[in-house]
Amino acid sequence: MPETSAATDYLVGLIGSGIAPSLTPALHEREADELGLRYLYRRLDIDALGLPPTAVGDLLSAARLTGYRGLNITHPCKQLVLPFLDELSAEARALGAVNTVVFEADAIIGHNTDAPGFAAGLRRGLPGVRMDKLVQLGAGGAGSAVAHALLGLGAGTLTLHDAEPSRAHGLAAALTGRFGPGRAVVSTGLADAVTTADGLVNATPVGMWNHPGLPLPAELLRPGLWVADVVYRPLDTELVRTARELGAPVLTGGPMAVFQAAHAFALFTGREPDTDRMLRHFDTLTTPTPRGRHDAFAHS
């Protein structure tokens, strides 16, 4: 396997379901061009390949044997990939999910760039917002990364709401183990929690083209409640549009998508990407065209 310090040629990929709309390949390849690297990013769509999610281990082995430097991993394989890895980064171990795999000479190492990606996006897009009381919708894979990021940034109390209460309870328990008691609680009444919250984060797929609409009643939004969404295509989800029209500060899913890609790029290459340049490239990729474009959840 190539070493990141000496390699100039990279073969990487993305494993997941329905990943044709992902902008990650374009972000990686464009930044590699700017840095003078030969870089090929391939999609390994389990739907197109006719494979079940449990085939992620076989795909991992095949990629390593054929010279891949690493892989991004997205829904529904972020947890299924864990048994096939030799080591986990501290972040991946805490989240119990992996979205980036690096093939080293003697080990397969799993990382998670979603949490630092969201944290960097929030710091950049909504600097200085109050974080005493926050509400998060969704406690799945993306929700876990976002919740760890929010508490890592110093959120006081994070109230979790999920359509499957067991997922919210499971995530709250994991967060309590890492950050201490009282920092993460499960919602007993969404309206009451939002009414007293400083900020709201949507970590559900609601807002995507195939999951249209708002993830909560519109009347719960207000000008003093900042809103962040992890859906990045479309950038202007119904939640973002509604909150913006009310005069609330908003953060789209775009910055998270870019910063998680930048972290993964650095892991694959050992080179620090220019995140400002990647953000500009993302803007060109998401500019509406007459032909339209697909929508996607904010992950690899």
Image: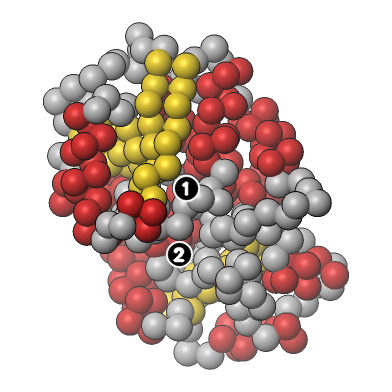
Query: Is residue 24 left or right of 246 when viewed as pictured?
Result: left
- Spatial CA distance of label 2 from label 1 is 14 Å
Query: Is residue 16 left or right of 125 when viewed as pictured?
Result: left
Q: Which mark is residue 249?
A: none
Q: Pinpoint residue 173: horizontal percent, then vertical percent.
A: 31, 71
Residue at (47% x, 16% y) in the render: 38
Disc 1: CA contacts within 10 A as few (<14), some (14-19) or many (>=20): many
Disc 2: CA contacts within 10 A as few (<14), some (14-19) or many (>=20): many
Residue at (43% x, 77% y) in the render: 185
Determine which residue is flagged by label 2: 143
Q: Can residue 196 be spotted in the picture?
A: no
Vertical side of 260 occupied by 6: above or below: above
Amino acid at pointer 2: Gly
- The residue mark sitting in front, 2 or 1, is 1
Vertical side of 134 occupied by 89: above or below: above
Q: Pinpoint residue 39: horizontal percent, then vertical percent.
A: 46, 22
Foreground pick, 245 / 284:
284
Q: Pinpoint residue 7: horizontal percent, then vertical percent.
A: 36, 12
Quadrant of the rendering where the N terminus is positioned:
top left
Foreground pick, 198 / 19:
19
Q: SS of the residue at dot 1?
A: loop
Foreground pick, 275 / 287:
287
Q: Residue furthest top?
A: 6
Q: Pinpoint residue 278: horizontal percent, then vertical percent.
A: 63, 32
Amino acid at pointer 1: Ser
Vertical side of 95 occupied by 1: above or below: above
Determine which residue is flagged by label 1: 300
To which quarter of the image does residue 5 belong?
top left
Q: SS of the residue at dot 2?
A: helix
Q: How is the image coloured?
A: secondary structure
Query: Is residue 60 left or right of 265 when viewed as pictured?
Result: left
Vertical side of 103 occupied by 261: above or below: below
